[in-house]
């Protein structure tokens, strides 16, 4: 776990991305919501793996897949 020492900073970044994503949703700024939401989910997947929180990990893996599908659908 190379980034274990940066866990708290990653969580602050995830909080910032979550707030930014919420603002994008409120202002109807599609597709920015997907581009902001994907790194948010990936940070939480990593943090869940760090502490073996299986439910949080799988929820965020599902959402990461959905965001990836949405981004790919947007471009293609």
Image (spheres, rainbow, N blue to C red):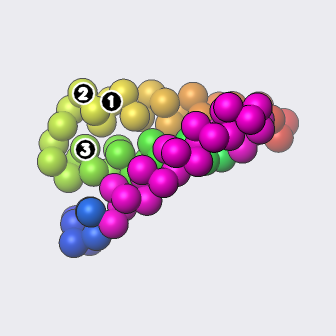
User: Of callouts 2 and 3, which one flags the residue occurring earlier in the amino acid sequence?
Assistant: 3
Position of 54 with respect to 22 (left or right) is left
Instruction: Tell me which residue sits at (52%, 51%) in the image.
Output: 17
Q: Is residue 39 above or below residue 62?
A: below
Q: Residues within 10 Å of mark 1 (few under 14, many from 20)?
A: some
Does the stretch in magenta take in 25? Answer: yes
Q: Residue 18, percent across and down?
A: 49, 44
Question: Regarding mark 3 in the picture, which secondary structure is present there?
Answer: helix
Q: Residue 71, percent across and down?
A: 71, 38
Image quadrant where one finds the C terminus: top right
Q: Residue 67, percent across and down?
A: 60, 34
Q: Residue 48: which disc?
A: 3
Question: Which portion, as a residue range, is magenta?
Answer: 9-34
Do the CB atoms of the residues marked 3 and 1 lie less than 8 Å apart? no
Instruction: Tell me which residue sits at (21%, 32%) in the image.
Output: 54
Instruction: Tell me which residue sits at (33%, 66%) in the image.
Output: 9
Do the CB atoms of the residues marked 2 and 3 lie less than 8 Å apart? no
Instruction: Tell me which residue sits at (57%, 28%) in the image.
Output: 66
User: Of callouts 3 and 1, which one flags the residue occurring earlier in the amino acid sequence?
Assistant: 3
């Amino acid at each position: 776990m190379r980034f274990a020492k940066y866990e708290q900073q990653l969580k602050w970044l995830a909080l910032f991305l979550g707030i930014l994503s919420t603002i994008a949703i409120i202002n109807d700024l599609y597709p920015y919501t997907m581009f902001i939401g994907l790194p948010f989910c990936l940070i939480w997947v990593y943090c869940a793996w760090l502490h073996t929180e299986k439910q949080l990990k799988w929820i965020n893996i599902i959402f990461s897949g959905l965001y990836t599908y949405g981004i790919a659908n947007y471009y293609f």
